[in-house]
Image (cartoon, helix red, strand yellow):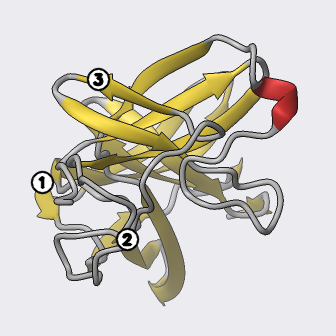
Amino acid sequence: MKVQNAAVAIIFGMILVAGIACGEKNGSSTPTPTPTQIPTAASNEMNIDATYNGGKYYYLETTGSGWGIGELPREYSDATAYIYDINPVPILTHDWSTESYWYNKMGLTVTVENLGTETATSIYIYAAFDAGGDIVWNPEESPHFNLKPDESKEYTMQLNIPEGEHTRLIVQIVDNGYSVDKSYSEWFDT
């Protein structure tokens, strides 16, 4: 009953459920779980499973209690199942704080965290002051870095504050050329 390295989503009508990839097992015994195994029961007439890309997947009811692996609510007994791959991805979040160094300098400390299941590669922090109309003042970028799942990194940047302007700070995390997490300060006068 080894768990495959993939997961899928099985959709019945408008209900999204998770699928677990399992090897086949004869009989109705439930194996003891290990880091590479998952407990399952043998199928009966109420169970539903599917074979996809060489792995066997069992329906998991996640909206109610008391359901076993592979048990399907009666209202979905005639529904068509659609199977979609769920691929590991990085999920990046950030938090930041500032410190005023002197007259027109600001220290920006950003903590980036990867909450996903895949390593984020060649990401960077982008910071600038908002000039309005999709224009920015004094943009800065951190060096590019990688971030493993459940890992965080702190980086401090020095920003030049524009003089005599009404602005706000923009902080973005950029992954593969896309802003994947963005935040703003309140508007302020310099």
Kindly identify which residue carries mark 3: 52
Quarter of the view holding residue 188? bottom right
Tell whether 35 sits left or right of 133: left
Viewer-closest of 85 and 95: 85
Q: Could you tell me how far apart the alpha carbons at marks 1 and 2 are, in whole angstroms?
A: 42 Å
Direction from residue 83 to residue 5 in the image, left or right: left
Task: Give yes or no for contact between labels 1 and 2 (Cβ–Cβ under 8 Å).
Answer: no
Query: Above or below — where is 158 with respect to 128?
Result: below
Q: How far, Cα to Cα, is label 1 from label 3?
A: 38 Å
| 188 versus 8 height, above or below | below
Q: Position of residue 99 (x, y in %)?
A: 50, 88
Residue at 49%, 62% in the rendered image: 161
For the N terminus, the quadrant is bottom left
- Residue matched to label 1: 144
Residue at image mark 2: 39
Q: Residue at x 70, y 40 (%)?
A: 72
Please state the horizontal and vertical placement of residue 164, each as a whole percent of the image: 66, 55
| Position of residue 145 in the picture relative to residue 109 (left or right) | left
The secondary structure type at the circle numbered 3 is: strand
**Amino acid at pointer 2:** Pro
Question: 10 Å neighbourhood of mark 1: few (<14), some, or many (≥20)?
Answer: few
Residue 126's disc number: none
